[in-house]
Amino acid sequence: MSRPARAASRTPPPVPEFRDLGRREFEPVWAEMRTWTEGRDGRERDRIWRVEHPPIFTLGRAGKREHVLAAGDIPVLHIDRGGQVTYHGPGQLVVYPQVDLRRLGLGIRALVEALELAVVDTLAGYGIEAASRRDAPGVYVGGRKIAALGLRVRNGCTYHGLAFNVNMDLEPFSRINPCGYAGLEVTQVCDLGGPDDPDRVMQDLWPHLLQRLGYKSSQ
């Protein structure tokens, strides 16, 4: 797949600030992203966070509770990203790009494609063939979803982002219609012969993120 089209050639912005938050509850991270994004004035360097959340189901703005089939002891939270319902839990690589779309010269569709392609590139490095779907954002391997996307745009800037299954308990996905699709199967990197360490996958994903999003080289 080719790189998403962007606006006329421009000087690439500096590499975003990266923060590894470790394992954090969802709501405080969400609140901090939202507050920072709403207060941006165009001068701040973009930032990308990596985090792992304790078990939680999140429903997007238009999310329908009917897609949560049996939450059990896992909390359900209605949030302000796009998309339907997904699951976050230990062993999942969650990446939150908080970027200025105008500075990158990207529209929201091109941003989604760039994030998808960064995951596809990373999986290709493990010998795993993956692809995106125009009708259902995310990344799939043999029809099974391995990465979900959900974004929020405020004043031309984004938060929320990407959930990439690496080495987790996939059972909670059976309690929902993932991303609103009944019967959609999910998979993860370690079950496909790739690494079982989210830290390793983040290291491998990072240069692909920078390249696909159009940042200056980190070298």
Image (cartoon, rainbow, N blue to C red):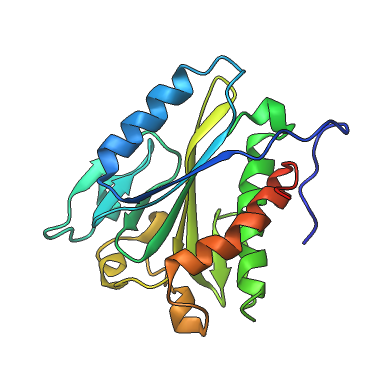
Left or right of residue 187: residue 110: right
Near-viewer residue (19 or 175): 19
Q: Position of residue 167 (x, y in %)?
A: 38, 73
x, y percent for residue 23:
29, 53
Give the vertical position of 143 relative to 192 (above or below).
above
Of 18 and 184, nearer the camera is: 18
| x 52%, y 61%: residue | 202
Residue at the spot 50% in from the left edge and 82% down from the top edge? 192
Q: How many marks?
A: 0
Is residue 96 placed above or below 144 in the rendered structure?
Answer: above
Residue 33, position as x, y percentages in the image:
40, 32
Q: Quadrant of the N terminus?
A: bottom right
Residue 94, horizontal then vertical, whole percent? 43, 53
| Vertical arrangement, residue 27 with respect to residue 73, above or below | above
**Residue displayed at 73% across by 50% down:** 219
User: Which residue in the rendered view is the most extreme toward the front?
Assistant: 219
Q: Quadrant of residue 169?
A: bottom left
Q: Quadrant of residue 138?
A: bottom right
Residue 133 seen in render: no
Q: Is residue 53 left or right of residue 123?
A: left
Query: Residue at left 48%, top 75%?
Result: 189
Q: Quadrant of residue 103?
A: top right
Q: Residue furthest right?
A: 9
Q: Is residue 22 visible?
A: yes
Name the residue at the left extreme.
73
In the displayed structure, does residue 131 sit left or right of residue 185?
Answer: right
Q: Nearer the viewer, residue 17 or 209?
A: 17
Choose between 176 and 193: the one closer to the eye: 193
